[in-house]
Image (cartoon, coloured by chain):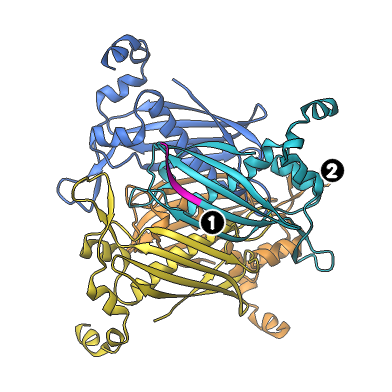
Chain colours: A orange, B blue, C cyan, D yellow
Amino acid sequence: MTNRKTIHIEWGDCDPAQIVYFPRYFAYFDACTAGLFKKVGLPKRQMLKTYGIIGIPLVDVRASFMAPSRFSDTVVVESEITEWRRSSFSVRHRLFNKGALAVECFEIRVWAAVSERDPEQIESKPVPREVIEKFSVRGLARPKSRRAKQ
Amino acid sequence: MTNRKTIHIEWGDCDPAQIVYFPRYFAYFDACTAGLFKKVGLPKRQMLKTYGIIGIPLVDVRASFMAPSRFSDTVVVESEITEWRRSSFSVRHRLFNKGALAVECFEIRVWAAVSERDPEQIESKPVPREVIEKFSVRGLARPKSRRAKQ
Amino acid sequence: MTNRKTIHIEWGDCDPAQIVYFPRYFAYFDACTAGLFKKVGLPKRQMLKTYGIIGIPLVDVRASFMAPSRFSDTVVVESEITEWRRSSFSVRHRLFNKGALAVECFEIRVWAAVSERDPEQIESKPVPREVIEKFSVRGLARPKSRRAKQ
Amino acid sequence: MTNRKTIHIEWGDCDPAQIVYFPRYFAYFDACTAGLFKKVGLPKRQMLKTYGIIGIPLVDVRASFMAPSRFSDTVVVESEITEWRRSSFSVRHRLFNKGALAVECFEIRVWAAVSERDPEQIESKPVPREVIEKFSVRGLARPKSRRAKQ
């Protein structure tokens, strides 16, 4: 299950060196992770409502920048979930510019809800099995039932 | 040589989970790195002009998010350069919220100029010795000569 | 009641023309409006909780850009509420760079809460009289009573 | 000549009220203006190089926000240049959410180059006639020559 997202790099994503301002890459990747869930039938707003979570915040991220990209470039990001753990999961993003790998990013995110003891706090919760299954081959092999619902 | 920067977290830095949207942390840290150089007498615009570079872009970054921060929080970031290499250097940022470490970030940046062979390309250049010296204890111990210049 | 906020313009606020990317000015001004309320004792998070609102979103904004500002510039923004209406209010921001007016911005914001009929909707509510009074001269002339409360 | 751009609203474009953080609308519109020029054959990077300008910065902008939009919404922005003047031009953007006008924005931008007298300054220059003609009906009526090139 890989999501491919085409991104047109905008003027406002670039800094005075005329290349993408690196925090913007993380916004791209955040949208790519949302795109992954959307692809299996879980647009973010719907997903939060269905599962009673407040988001899928990061606990860890790292990125390597191999080549700069510039405004008016069109890049492609390939994203996939590389591991599911009890209440967290890993995502890998690879951004390609003219076919060459330009940025690679690894995110670790948690399935997070408002704490039941303290509404001011956020706590991780187990990722529902049905969410994980949507990403499995079997999940993708059931387009019929999904079509039936609509 | 540690730079301490106090940051007031703004509404616009936060996402629908009401916590800081993580790419914004990288913008904070980018400003903190600039603050380090400013502290030794190299405000960024001046530094770029003086040394003929186009910036100090990242080649690698990683961050761990231990606790969320929210709008109206005031946080403190402690930043320091942990290693100088020929044409790159490492920076560590630690963001504290109410005294507790909330985010830690490690950047590797390069001293970068427009390529002489191809003005469309960026290439790394050796960090000037005098820049590195400004961060050394000896550099900080020479306020007299700096005052003399003014 | 004028709030003065000093802003150091960061690299990441600027675009490839090396000047502030104009949407960032609106983020500055949004923080300046929050600063106005904070100055009268209403930090945003506290204000939202106390009055049961979800924010003070804009319904109208206009800005004139008289001169560009650049990274490493330090600018000052003077902000004031120029008019209170039943459920909305007007804010004027003036950004000065080296003493010269560089940007002027006029916001109209509403005092907004989740709709009681439809929790998916937002609706304006009357601005509480006590909020408005905090901005009046009389309000500012009562430091004693405020101190007494603490 | 109208450009229609479909925008998927991302989590990171929204604020703690769970609606689009208004400065992000201006980034959307900035990309829409770039999209207009791209549509007539002038992708921004190319345009800057061809005409020796540093950008098309704003001198004036106003916007009205009629209805909020939220993450996971897909909106459409219709943009058109409503007036050409000697060295500036006006752009109108209308953002529709589920068919209803949600935001309207009017930009005035200048055709800007580095000043010849002072390279630290920016100055407006006359918009080249051939740029304006690309947006005219005649310009659009010449698909043949353009097709011939391909």
Label 2: chain letter: A
Depth check, mark 1 against mark 2: the one in front is 1
Quadrant housing the N terminus of chain A: bottom right
Q: Chain of mark 1?
A: D
Residue D7 at x, y percent in the picture: 52, 70
Which residues fall within the magenta stretch?
Answer: C99-104
Q: Number of marks in the image?
A: 2
Amino acid at pointer 1:
Pro
**Dot 1 corresponds to which residue?**
D23
Secondary structure of residue under mark 2: loop
Residue assigned mark 2? A117
Mark 1 Cα shell of 10 Å, populated few (<14), some (14-19), many (≥20): some
Q: Residue at x 63, y 78 (%)?
A: D98
Confirm whether residue A81 shows in the render.
no
Q: Is residue D111 magenta?
A: no
- Nearest the viewer among D6 and D54 is D54
Decide: marks 1, 2 in contact (CB < 8 A)?
Answer: no
Q: Residues within 10 Å of mark 2 (few under 14, many from 20)?
A: few
Q: Amino acid at mark 2?
A: Arg
Specify the label residue C63 is tagged with.
none
- Spatial distance from mark 1 to mark 2, Cα to Cα? 35 Å
Side of B73 where B123 appears, left or right: left
Residue C33 horizontal side relative to residue D50, left or right: right
Is residue A83 at least partly visible in the picture?
yes
**Side of C68 where A123 appears, left or right:** right
Residue B74 percent across, percent down from the top left: 63, 34
Q: Residue at x 51, y 45 (%)?
A: C94
Is C103 contained in the magenta span?
yes
Whole-percent x and y of residue B76?
Answer: 58, 30
Closest to the observer: C32 or D5?
A: C32
The quadrant in which the C terminus of chain A is found is bottom right
- Residue A138 falls in which quadrant of the image? bottom right
